[in-house]
Image (cartoon, rainbow, N blue to C red):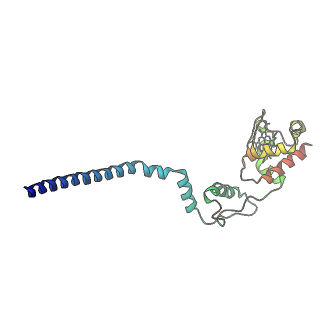
Amino acid sequence: MSAEHDKKFFDTFMMVLGVLVAVAIGILILVRIVAANTQEKHVMADPALRAAVEERIQPIGKVAIAGQDNSALAMTSGAQAGAASGASGAASAAPAADMSGEQVYNMACVACHGAGVAGAPKHGDKGAWSARLAKGIDTLYKHAIEGFQGDAGFMPPKGGRVDLSDQSVKNAVDFMVQAAK
Ligand code: HEC
């Protein structure tokens, strides 16, 4: 009697155990299927991960050529600066050097300000500049560096050349302001 009771208990126990193991394996399989369809894709598309990978596989050096436009180097290193957070100082190019106003003007401003394109106050046009000079030089610096939407049109930040140093842009403003006085 007692032995039969034990056997019955044992059979039931093994059956419950078997069901639990089966359920556990079922959940494991389900998790793997869901993860394969979602997790990996999200992880691979994550911009932070992509930026980190781009940063790891970038070439160890970049060549800057004297006397040529090396702004593309400065721009990429600027874009990566966030991800690199200064860790790879040797790999990133030096911060953009300050340039003379005339240099900057001819490189980044003349396209619009040379002929007065799209509402830009023309270089040397005293009439177009007088009202702007009245705002004070600090406002003009600020508008040239940060960009400015006026009645005449849109002045893009740093004339679209965000790789330029603030001082370079200020020099270019000085250069234009001198010609308009
Ligand atoms: C894509 C065309 C474009 C380029 C390139 C550009 N500008 Fe301008 N800029 C404008 C326009 C348009 C205005 C007039 C905005 C307005 O008043 O409506 C303007 C206005 C200005 C002003 C007067 C801002 C004010 O407060 O009145 C300054 C200073 C100036 N630009 C400096 C620069 C400098 C320096 C550069 C080169 C680094 C440059 N701009 C390149 C289009 C441009």
Answer with left or right where residue 181 lies relative to residue 161. right
Q: Position of residue 114 (x, y in %)?
A: 81, 43
Extreme left residue here? 1
Q: Give the left or right position of residue 43, taking residue 154 as reference.
A: left
Q: Is residue 35 above or below residue 56?
A: above
Residue at 28% over, 53% down: 25
Quadrant of picture, ligand 1: top right
Q: Residue at x 88, y 36 (%)?
A: 131
Q: Is 122 in front, or is 165?
A: 165
Question: Which is nearer the eye, 173 or 47?
Answer: 47
Q: Nearer the viewer, residue 84 or 91?
A: 84
State the quadrant of the C terminus.
top right
Residue 77, given in percent of the width and then of the height, sits at 65, 58
Q: Quadrant of residue 134?
A: top right
Check the image and report above or below for 90 versus 164: below
Residue 101 is situated, as x and y percent measured from the top left of the image, at 83, 52
Judge whether 142 appears above or below 85 on screen. Answer: above
Check the image and name the residue furthest to the top.
151
